[in-house]
Amino acid sequence: MYEGMLFALCLLTLVLFQSAASCELRPVLAQVPKRLPAGYVIAEGKEELTLKGCAAKPVAFTSSDPDFTVNTDGTIITVRGLEITTKQFSVLVQDENRSDWKVDIILSCKDEKSSSVAHKRTKRRWRPLPFSIIENDSPPFPKELEMISSDSSVNYTVYYQISGQGVTTDPKELFILNKNTGMLSVTRAVDREQYPQFNFIARVFDVSGRETDAFLPITVNVEDKNDNAPEFIGSRFFTVEERCRAGTVIGQVNATDKDQAKTPHTLIKFTLHNATDMFSIDPFTGVITAKTNTLDREAQEKVYVEIEIRDMGGASSGLFSRGTVVITLTDVNDNPPTFKEKLYKAKVQENQENVLVTRIPVEDKDLVNTSNWKALFEVTKGNESGNFRMETDPKTNEGLLYVIKGLDFEKTPLVKLEITARNEVPLVGTDTKWLSVPLELSVGDEDEGPEFNPAILYLKVKENVANGTIIGTYKALDPENKNSNGIKYYKMTDPGNWITVVENTGELKTANTIDRESPLVHKDMYNITIRAVDESKKTGKGMVIIQIEDVNDNMPVILDPDLIMCSKDDMLSSVLVEAVDLDQRPYSTPFIFELGADHDGKWKMKDATESSVVLEQAVALPTGLYSVPLLVKDLQGFGKEQTVNVRVCTCEREENGVGICGARSASSSLGSLGILALVLSGLLLLLLSLLLIFICSTKRDKLYISDDTGTGGMLLKSNTEAPGEEVKDGALLMIPGTEVVDGSLQSGLMESKNVTSASGRYGQQFFQGGGVYNTTTQEFGTEKFYSSGRYDNNLYGNNTLQKLSNRSALDTWKTNGRYLDRKLAYFGDKEEGRYADDLLKTYGHEGMGSPAGSVGCCSNLGEQESVDFLNTLGPKFKPLADVCYTTNRTGN
């Protein structure tokens, strides 16, 4: 009966799972004896039936032939004894992913003597076969399951023991065994969802405690009962846009069942119990879809759908659960803003600007504070002149109508507008269009100032027109009575003061020369603004734009009359002469260039353009400066002869194709030695200046001078910290014997003339170049000497200083010497007091607010009658006269 037990049981597994990559199971080919006893093993082994190469493992086996059974470990065994020649059946393999695999089993007879493939079991050691129990079985317990027996009981007195899961490990004592008879019993109900299978072992011992047979692995399968209702898993909250298309997938409801998979106990069916007009659900996948395209968030934002899940494929005997799915409809812009009124009315005063006229409320059913709800307003009719602007109040969503340009009651007392409201995003899912509403705006009347008509007046005037010429009239009208009575006109702006406005008539007359080339003119346009004032002192403003027409009042002028011509070898060089005329065509270019009538024939012209000509040497010229007369005339022949100074030099090098003269090259190539020489010379000049300051500031002793008569004079060094006013302002040393005539110095000694004062004259003035040069004149013998006084004009920039600077230092020294000699001789003829009287006195500033201001310097006269003239000089010189009188009396 047990013959062939050593049959190659691995053959089935190798064929079933030979293709690991694709999980393809091939048929099992096995040779077996012709007579197969009950319990004959065709193939066995868990390892061989694990679907090698596949991700999932086998969990159940089902035979298509009732004569064969397959244990849970994959062993194929005959159920009863039978005789075969050939036999074919199939085994259905289920993996843990609920996938089914079909394996064909093909049996053929073999020689009874052959034992290479199938093995015959000659002795059966244990019985019975693996068995099953039903989960949650009803009492009473314990219940007998099966009797196990070992063949060793024939030869020995034995007893049995079991151990393992359900016996000695959790759940303990679930299975018990009569150790003498081998009857296996279950003590209580079992939940398959907790323990789907039990594996334990049975052992047999003789009375001496010796194990008489190998242990027997026992597998008890717990058969499933439909004792668990399906349960929802995952989220049951979904969203979908309103107005979505029918058939749009909204989401999937997921459920599970704890019962055995791939059985009717876990076949779940989904059913909607409400909202069936809005949604549908797939009965076996749980996918919810939209059933219509009319889902409306504004009607119902959240839809609560009740769903039933029932096992047994939805059969009435199946267990079920119910749950609620929440479907939220999201907003789309399917509602335009609507106006609350059919007609809006408002009022505004004329001439008002940037004022809020009215607020226009709207309603929108879409989600608040979203782009679908926010309104945008526009004046679609009646705003052709741009008088209005629309805005949106972000809080209330109202339309705000503003007047940005003043309205005129006299022109339009009633303005009819059309206001259109839109959203920030387009409408979808609806055929509705954007809505509009009419608005009537009444304009209030006000007493207004004069208005110029037109607001901008354009006039054409030729430049240089005679002063007093009437170029036009610019009048304003009272908008109330439409006349100009009592209106006066005034200029507001006139940059060049070219125009005069007649106050009563508004006539515009030229007041000064109008020059088109003036910088006040832009693109031949000159603007002035006029103000009109009526009898009620209300004003209006207008603008006059004068378009100035050109006349030929400018001659062409050579831009650069000083030119440099670089001459190289014996080549005849040339230079470009350019001219410009401020006038426009046809009073300017093209210019006519001609050589002047007095030209020397050494030059010629070529390559003339509209505004330039090339001046070329007619003969080779040596280096030097040449004056070339050129006659330049405009297109109308208006021009004059001009002189171009051309410096001819020798080219030393070229830069960018242009010759550079030697002098410029030398000056531009100052090396490091030249820079060092400049620095050293600057330092030397600084040292000389410091030495001169030291010498001049050194204190000197008194110097006594003897004259021819034996009387002595003494010169004192005052050591004044700063020179007097006469030194500061009259820096020019006046040479004795010179005079100022028409801004120049005339050399030579002045002859003796009739002099009213024996000692000299004071306050004499010479006029030079618009300034006054005050001097003090002393007469010594027959010659006049001028001491330097105050000169108020800039003396250093005229020809006088240049002429004086040309005199040699020796002449200056001799002249001063002669002056001192005569002075000493004059002193010798006078009494002792004359020395002090002759000294110059310097007086300081009289102080701020003094009527005399600042008094310069004066000399004390020796005789009383010589200072009487000071009383006639006015209040400014009154302090000077008092000082001089006091000094004269005291002799100090």
Image (cartoon, helix red, strand yellow):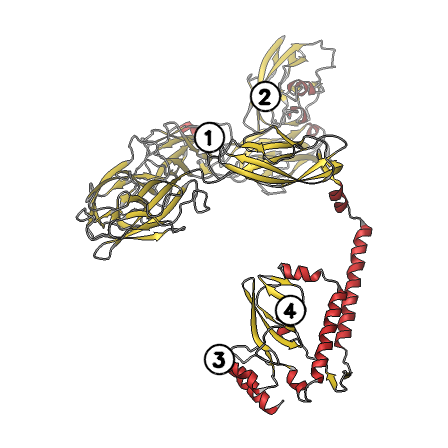
- Residue holding disc 4: 750
Q: Quadrant of residue 437?
A: top left
Task: Name which residue lies at 47% across and 31% down.
Answer: 266
Mark 3: amino acid: Thr
Alpha carbon distance from label 3 to label 1 = 144 Å
First in residue order: circle 2 vs circle 4? 2
Mark 1: amino acid: His
Q: Quadrant of residue 732?
A: bottom right
Alpha carbon distance from label 4 to label 1 = 150 Å
- Residue holding disc 2: 69
First in residue order: circle 3 vs circle 4? 4
- Residue holding disc 1: 265
Alpha carbon distance from label 1 to label 2 = 24 Å
Packing grade of label 3 (10 A; few <14, some 14-19, many >=20) is: few
Q: Is residue 640 above or below residue 359?
A: above
Residue 878 vs residue 347, the one in the foreground: 878
In the rendered view, does 340 fall on the left or right side of 672? Answer: left
